[in-house]
Amino acid sequence: MSDVGSEKRAFPSLRLVPKAEEPQSARDFKTDQEVRWCPGCGDYAVLAAVQSFMPELGIRRENTVFVSGIGCSSRFPYYMNTYGVHSIHGRAPAIATGLASSRRDLSVWVVTGDGDALSIGGNHLIHALRRNVNLKILLFNNRIYGLTKGQYSPTSELGKITKSTPMGSLDAPFNPLSLAIGAEATFVARTIDSDRRHLQSVLRAAAGHEGTALVEIYQNCNIFNDGAFEVLKDAGTRDEALIRLEHGQPIRFGAESGSGVFRGPDGELFVAPVTPSNEADVLVHDAHAAGPATAFALSRIADADTLHHTPIGVLRDVRRPVYDELMADQLATAVAQRGPGDLATLLAGNDTWTVD
């Protein structure tokens, strides 16, 4: 199976970002800061994968920015030898939107967690997605609040027993990919912290996308929610649990690819054994389909409690006008028609008043 998004290595979304004069290595993207996560945390694997991937972009470190909110994953900018903003809780997408829109010579990345992005930051996340700003969002999902010591999060399963829900959570969890597709996201993908090859292939596809790319990364919190994704990682169960998506290929998985994804008469997707009589009906994955219906249906296949039949890879990758390009064109038109703006005149214009 080929890497996800391998055709995207030209990274067209970064065409305005200055290139590095000399080749770079993963070492160039490591800082002298002590990495301070709990031993065994999945964040280490994601950090190493990102640091190893960044040289492929071929851009200058001073033209790369990582923006984070609050949470364990939000320490990420300290460990990347680029510019970084450790911002406020849930507001990383809003800050990154302003940065990416005003400085199109920058490669802007957001690092956030399931609590930071989907609780206090939910509103900011969906608006960044619908605007289609040219930024990449890495959503670390460990299904728990780690920094504040183990409360249930917006992605914790129903009935989850935690310090804040001793009798079990009553909240239905968010499905981050379904939420993103519903918010008109143009790129939606999922990967796993421990599968470095797959993680980096998804990062390549995200980097090559023009517009907002959301990558959900299943990440293990070995202190407060250890083993949450073990069914997707254990050698004895992962082949039957993971559905690896590849654009243009039939969606088959399991031992000897014996299981497949099919579309029922009601339009819903379901999983069933592949037989000679139904082999031609196996759904072929089309990440570039104009409509979001199939991508949304794929995002709903996994059982929220057991994670059985979980799709990973790029679910949706479509083109739509990019917000920062539209804004730049609008500003250029305004200047051409009316001349350069005058801030002092604007501030002292007719729509002002004096309060005694």
Image (cartoon, grey):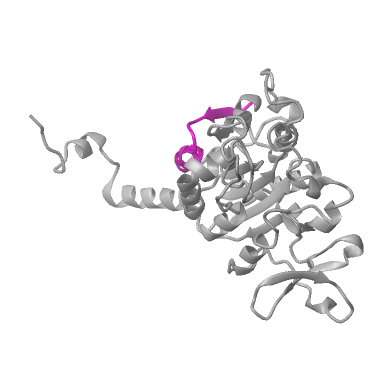
Name the one closer to the observer, 342 or 285.
Answer: 285
Task: Name the quarter where the C terminus is drawn.
Answer: top left
Relative side of 59 to 67, left or right: right
Image height of 291 relative to 224, above or below: below
Farthest-out residue, left: 356
Is residue 73 visible in the rendered structure shown here?
Answer: yes
Answer whether residue 82 is magenta in the image.
yes
In this rendering, position of residue 351 left or right of residue 43: left
- The residue shown at (67%, 55%) is 304
Q: Which quarter of the figure has residue 203?
A: top right
Considering the image in quadrants, where does the N terminus appear? bottom right
Residue 151 lies, in percent from the top left, at 59, 36
Q: Residue at x 66, y 73 (%)?
A: 268
Q: Residue at x 70, y 33 (%)?
A: 43
Residue 331 point in image, percent of width and height: 37, 48
Q: Nearer the viewer, residue 104 or 246?
A: 246
Count of labels in the image: 0
Residue 121, above or below 84: below
Residue extending furthest right?
Answer: 256
**Magenta residues, start to end:** 81-103
Residue drawn 85% across the image and 52% down it? 237
Residue 121 among magenta residues: no
- Residue 237 is left or right of residue 355, and the answer is right
Q: Which of these two is toward me, 153 or 318?
A: 153
Q: Position of residue 135 (x, y in %)?
A: 55, 44
* Residue 17 seen by the camera: no
